[in-house]
Image (tube, rainbow, N blue to C red):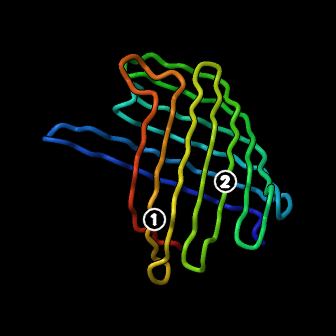
Amino acid sequence: KNQWINQFHFDTYSASEDGDDTADRLYTFYRLDYRLREDRGLYGRLAYEDDKFTGFKNQSDLTFGYNQTLFDRTNWSLKGDIGLGVRRSELDTGETNNEMLFTTAGYLDWQISENALFKQLLSFEIGEDLTITRSETSLEANIIGALAMKLALAVKNSSKAPEGKDETDTETTVTLVYKF
C-alpha cells in the first residue's frame, strides 16, 4: 500500500438575493499523510479560508499530527486525528491574531450499500482565543462510473465571532463528484 497519501480540497461558494451578496467564501486545504503502518500515520495540513461574511478577512492554519484507525469493520470505519499547529486570523479591520492550536477530528465512513456511502466528519481547532468546530454530514450515491451525487450538511461554529457576526454558519449542498 502507498505510504504517502495526498489530499487537496478546494471549495468556493457564493450567493445573492435581490442583487445583494449574501455569501462569498473560499476554503481550501492540502493534507499530506505518511503511513507508519496500515492503521496509523503522521500528517501535515495547510488550510486557508476567506469568507467575507464572518468578520474575518481570512484565516489560515498549519498543523502537524498523528492519525489512527480506531475501528475498521466490513462496511464502516472510524478514524481519528490529533495534532498541534498555529493559526493566523486577520479581521476585516486589519487587526491580526496568531495563536497556537490543538486539533482533533473524527471521521466515520459507512458503506451503506455498493452504491451509497455515508460520511460524518467532526473536527475541533482549539486555539488560545478561538475554537472552531466543523461538522459535515454527507450521503454520496454513485451515478455511473466515477461520477457520484453528494448531499451534504456542513456546520461551522466559531466560539468567538467578531461583533455583529453569527457564530454558526450552516450550508446545505447537492454536488456532482468525480473521483480519479
Tell me the residue at 46%/56% (across/down).
152
Spot occupied by residue 122 in the image (x, y as percentages of width and height): 62, 45
Type of the residue with mark 2: Tyr
Circle 2: element type: strand
Tell me the residue at 70%/31% (across/down).
102
Name, please, the residue furthest toward the left: 18
Q: Which residue matches tag 1? A: 150
Spot occupied by residue 99 in the image (x, y as percentages of width and height): 62, 22
Determine whether 4 is above or below 26 in the image. Answer: below
Quick one: quadrant of the N terminus?
bottom right
Considering depth in this image, is 14 or 141 the residue closer to the camera?
Answer: 141
- Tell me the tag on residue 107: 2
The reply to whether callout 2 and callout 1 are in contact (CB within 8 Å) is: no
Tell me the residue at 39%/29% (across/down).
54
Circle 1: element type: strand
Mark 2 is surrounded, within 10 Å at the Cα level, by few (under 14), some (14 to 19) or many (20 or more) other residues, namely some
Determine whether 122 is above or below 149 in the image. Answer: above
Tell me the residue at 51%/21% (across/down).
160
Distance Cα–Cα, label 2 vs label 1: 17 Å
Q: Is residue 15 left or right of residue 103?
A: left
- Tell me the tag on residue 163: none
Considering depth in this image, is 151 or 6 the residue closer to the camera?
Answer: 151
Spot occupied by residue 104 in the image (x, y as percentages of width and height): 70, 40
